[in-house]
Structures are given as structure tokens and as C-alpha cells.
Amino acid sequence: MPEVDWSRLKAHELRQRANDNAVVILPIASIEQHGPHLPVMTDTRLGHEIALRAARKASAERPVVVTPVVWSGLSEHHMPFGGTLTLSHDTFRRVIRDLIDALIRHGFRDILIANSHGGNIIAMQQILDELSPTSAATLVATTYVMEAGEDLSQHLEDQPGVMHAGEAETSMMLVCEPDLVDIRNIGTIASPDDAGKFLAAGRGSYRWRPFAHVTENGLAGNPTRSNAEKGEKMLEAGADAIARLILDPDTWADPLDRRLPETGGVPFRD
Ligand SMILES: [Zn+2]
């Protein structure tokens, strides 16, 4: 199996990946508090694991390479619990933009921003809105929790989907970093049931709040029945979903241009 980890490859091997039109996965994540039982690297570790597994799966059909994780994300809402490192939106946008620029200068043309932290989602989409109309590369953004959806949540017994430091993330960390998961009080640290609603107002409106609004210990969800067997199934489901996304020709195809010949206007991409 070809190496997919950018940081383990040599420069000439990466030049070859660009010549071979490899897809680049740029994982973005966070270093932030994950309750009393998980390390602050959780989103970074899980995002990297899923990206590497997805790349290995997809590389049977198309070369894929995974850059190191951009661990510095947008985590202001977790600051009250400590352990959290966060960027301003402006810095975050510049970091992502510059890394995309570097990839494009090396000749990569299909770039997948693979996110594993909820707080990055809106900004990530905004960055793509800003860059895509004039970018030399096709830019796609994914969050494995959303891309895999039901394929992940079907394994959960005590919460509806992947939440924060709950059943899903704890199970996956029991696979990736079992020595760093403190399971001593795992049955007594679940959050109240309305933990998912902290960024909402009214029936369909948005309000920012700190995470402390919904949880006393930094955790949202119920990790009581977390286990490594469940975690392995979820890591595979996440990786399968990202590999499918990479190999779907529609993901990278040029947009249709259905304008009539006399319409004129601005070309989508030069
Ligand atoms: Zn997390």
C-alpha cells in the first residue's frame, strides 16, 4: 500500500503525488477540553485517524495524500473549561487560505478540507465561498460526522449522534488512545439531554453561547456504554464515508454551465 501520510513522505515523492493528480486531504480540528475523561487532542486525533484510513481505502483507485492536521481551530465556546487553544476567525481563515495556496502552488488540484470539530464548520464553508470562485483547485469541505451521518449514529445506544466527548468520541478514543481515556467515572458524567441546543434560539434561529451553558463538566452526551468495539465500527464508518466522497466523480467534476450561448457574463474559472 502506498504511503498516504504527507509528513512521512520525501519531497520528490510529494512532487510525484502532484504529478499523479492526487487528492490532498487537509484535516482541520481543535485542541480543546473534552470533559473530565478525554484528552484535549480528541478532535485532532480522531480527524487524523479517519483521514488516514479514508486515504488508504481510496488510494486503491486514486492517489491520496493527507497533510498534518491543522490542530488550531475555533474553540472560543470551550475556553471556560480550560485546556483549550483557539484562534480568531481572521487568523484561522488566513492559515487555511495559505495552506491551500501552498498546495495549489505544488500542483495539487483536488483538495478536501476534512474537518472533525463542530466549531470550524461555518468558518470552513465561508472560506470555500470566498476562495472557490477564483481558485485554480476544486475545494471541497467535509465534516465526517455529517458525511457519515446515520452510518455512525446507528452504533450509538445512549445519544442520537456524535456529540462532544460522549459515547461516540469516547468509543473511538478507546481505539486510538486507550491509555488516555479515564473510564473510572464513565457512568456518572453524562450531560443533561438538551446539551445539543446551546447554539440555538427560537425555532430555527442562531445564538452563540459558551459551552458552559449546557454542561457542568464540559461533556455533551452519555459515554456510559462506550467501548472500543463500537469505536472501531465508527472509525471505519467515518473513513468509508470520506473515501466514498473522494472517489465519487461528482465531488470533483466541473460545475455545469447551463447558460444560453448569448448570456455572456463572468466565467466560473479561468
Ligand atoms: Zn470532539
Image (cartoon, helix red, strand yellow):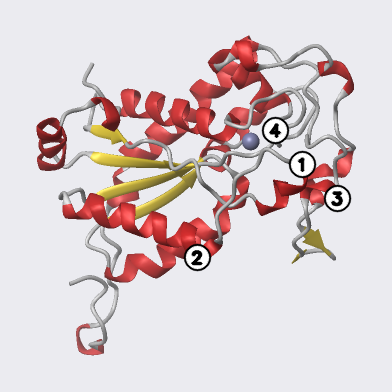
Disc nearest the viewer among 1 and 3: 1
Q: Which residue is mark 1?
A: 81
Q: Which residue is mark 3?
A: 213
Relative image position of residue 57 (x, y in whole percent): 34, 24
Relative image position of residue 150 (x, y in whole percent): 62, 33
Q: Earlier in the sequence, mark 3 or mark 2?
A: 2
Is disc 4's CB within 8 Å of ligand 1?
Answer: yes
Q: Quadrant of ligand 1?
A: top right
Q: CA distance from mark 1 to mark 4?
A: 9 Å
Name the element at disc 1: helix
* Foreground pick, 225 / 75: 75
Q: Is residue 196 visible?
A: yes
- Please identify the quarter of the rendering in which residue 263 is found: bottom left
Q: Which residue is mark 2?
A: 90
Q: CA distance from mark 2 to mark 1?
A: 23 Å
Instruction: Specify the amino acid type for callout 1.
Output: Phe
